[in-house]
Amino acid sequence: MKAAVFREMGIPMEIENISISKPIGREVLVRMEAVGVCHSDLHILTGDLPLPLPAVLGHEAAGIVEQVGADVHTVKPGDHVVVCLTFHCGRCEQCYGGNSHRCNTDEAMRGQTEPPRLFRGGEAFEPFMKMGAFAEQILVHESGCVVMRRDMPFDRACLIGCGVTTGLGAAIRAAGIRPGETVAVIGCGGVGLSAVNGAVLAGAGQIIAIDRIASKLELAQTFGATNTIDSSAGHAVEHVMALTGGRGVDHVIEAIGLKQTIEDGFAMLAKGGLETIVGAARYDAKIELPALAFLREKRVQGSMMGGVRNGIDIPRYIDLYMDGRLKLDEMISRHRPLEQLNAAFDDMRAGTLARSVIVFGE
Ligand SMILES: [Zn+2]
Ligand SMILES: [Zn+2]
């Protein structure tokens, strides 16, 4: 099959012909229909997150099940699925506690003694996020596959596999925004826009979108932001204070992952406010916060994958989209074939597009 192989930092990925194993145990072979280009993939390309190489990136995927292992019971060949990177065992403390997104079961990968999922001759390829979706097929653990309704288009569905679920879930699950509360969202890419959408669904009052790019702020307004702040000249905190009468906001959703934006987010909180960090920081990044602010009951928390419970939340998000209440169409800036993957990352580096989607067989 064709796959975009990442061999060395600074060198564009090339499409190579590699082999994919047959499913064993609880593995599922999925033919890719659409794969979103996510910032976490870019973090690998830039070395901000380390990964063994050569690797196949891509982890925001939707496709059709082709083949299943002998122990798979929840999906069957022909099913349309969103593949979500929150693979889980179903029988650990985190899974039993309703936090299956925190499970880091070894089951989602093959053991050292088993043959690699992706290979060519004696060479093995690392599937990023246990998926490796910039390829015609992926071989993944059953627990990441969520069957979706047939009328859901693949290019929209794939976004729910990572970015949308991360932002939407941060707003409605992790932050638990209440009707009328004020919210600031820092960063209006796919994750941030979904957080704005989540704030709308939760009934938030003022929703302030913050970004350095005017086109993204315009998009944030179509997602339901009530105010926008262009932070390209700095001073985002002062602007938020001015917009809230000096009070600050009840919630900040931070969707960039930089020291500066995380610290700014904390500074714009009202007393008792909660900053929820979803932006992926560099692995060695550290933040500094004024300790006295905790006596004003300001809080900060992390959120991973929007606390998603695959089998519950993903079908709900798909229904919300089909009802017109979850905006996905507006988020897709461009379709590209796998051969143009490097160009899609160039778009992302330029920062002007919300989301590129790699589509197969067009
Ligand atoms: Zn992602
Ligand atoms: Zn588990």
Image (spheres, rainbow, N blue to C red):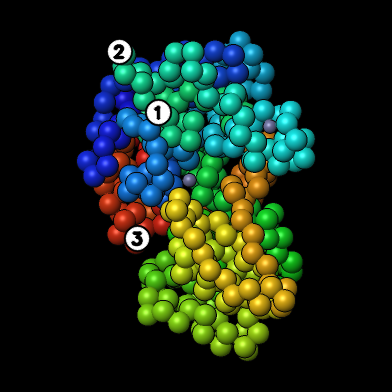
Name which residue type carries label 3: Gly
- Label whose residue precedes the other's in the sequence (1 or 2): 2
Residue name at image x 54 percent, y 13 percent? 24
From this view, report whether residue 319 is shown above or below residue 140. Answer: below
How many residues crowd mark 1 within 10 Å: few (<14), some (14–19), many (20+)? many
Residue name at image x 58 percent, y 26 percent? 106
How many residues crowd mark 2 within 10 Å: few (<14), some (14–19), many (20+)? few
Residue 256 seen anywhere in this rendered image of the structure: no
Name which residue type carries label 1: Glu
- Residue matched to label 3: 351
Mark 2 and mark 1 in contact (Cβ < 8 Å)?
no
Q: Residue furthest right?
A: 97
Foreground: 318 or 198? 198
Q: Quadrant of residue 195?
A: bottom right
Q: CA distance from mark 3 to mark 2?
A: 38 Å
Q: Residue furthest top?
A: 70
Q: CA distance from mark 1 to mark 2?
A: 15 Å
- Residue matched to label 2: 121
Q: Is the shortest distance between ligand 1 and the CB of mark 1 under 8 Å?
A: no
- Residue matched to label 1: 126
Q: CA distance from mark 1 to mark 3?
A: 27 Å
